[in-house]
Image (tube, grey):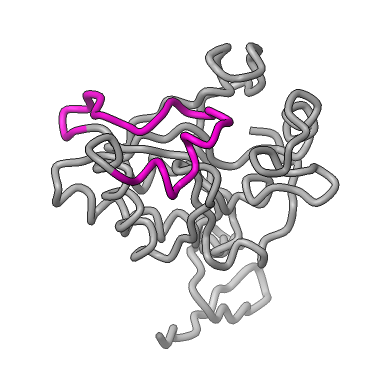
Amino acid sequence: MYYAPRVLRVGSLLIVLSGPCSYDGPGEAIAAPKGTDLIDVTTVIPDAVLEIRYATKHNFTGAVLYPVATCKLRRAVADKLVKAAAALRKLDRRLLIWDCYRPLSIQKVLWKKVSDPRYVADPSVGSKHNRGAAVDLAVVDKAGKAVVLPTAFDEFTVAAHRDRALVGPSGKEAKRLEDAMLAAGFTAMATEWWHYDASDAGNYALSDEPL
């Protein structure tokens, strides 16, 4: 897309702006958000149901780890999730989100509780969550009510492995989710049916930016 250059006068100076920028008062140009920015997912998927477990004690650590219940993702990753949400909406389903961006310092807390790389990434390597490029989620119906899911969130057993969780009547909703997420540009995790990484997750830097 071509953006025509614009010229701003600041005092005696002429400033030529090129690219997608917005202007917010004399002498101030604000760049458009980049694909690497962390954004609040509810601003682009307002009907998503947030149940951010690490902002409550209802998680495998039994402690409140997040100061706020928010879902942040890299903008380009959130754009992929918008596509998945649209596909599921056509099936009368909405996203139920359990976790998104996770600061690296919190990853260290989780690793101390469960030092098993099948379920928790070693913080020395980092999780895709720490890159703002992974999401833990399920679906609810269009009214926001629960549907049948294979297991609870963060069930660290073989029952949550994808080859078991997505079969039979109890796997129907999780399979719908998988179809939408893969089509939108995510990859699936074998040991957690609820976990998805953006296909380009490795392009984003690890972060400990507070929530």
Near-viewer residue (195 or 158): 158
Is residue 191 toward the left or the right of residue 167 in the image?
A: right
Figure check: 62 above or below 3: above
Q: Residue at x 73, y 58 (%)?
A: 205
Residue 106, horizontal then vertical, whole percent: 73, 31
Q: Residue at x 53, y 37 (%)?
A: 158
Figure check: 146 above or below 74: above
Say whether residue 140 is magenta.
no
Q: Residue at x 67, y 76 (%)?
A: 13
Figure check: 202 above or below 16: above
Is residue 83 toward the left or the right of residue 78 in the image?
A: left
Is residue 22 toward the left or the right of residue 145 in the image?
A: right
Quarter of the rendering occupied by the N terminus: bottom left
Say whether residue 164 is magenta.
yes
Residue 55, horizontal then vertical, whole percent: 56, 20
Residue situated furthest right in the rendering: 124
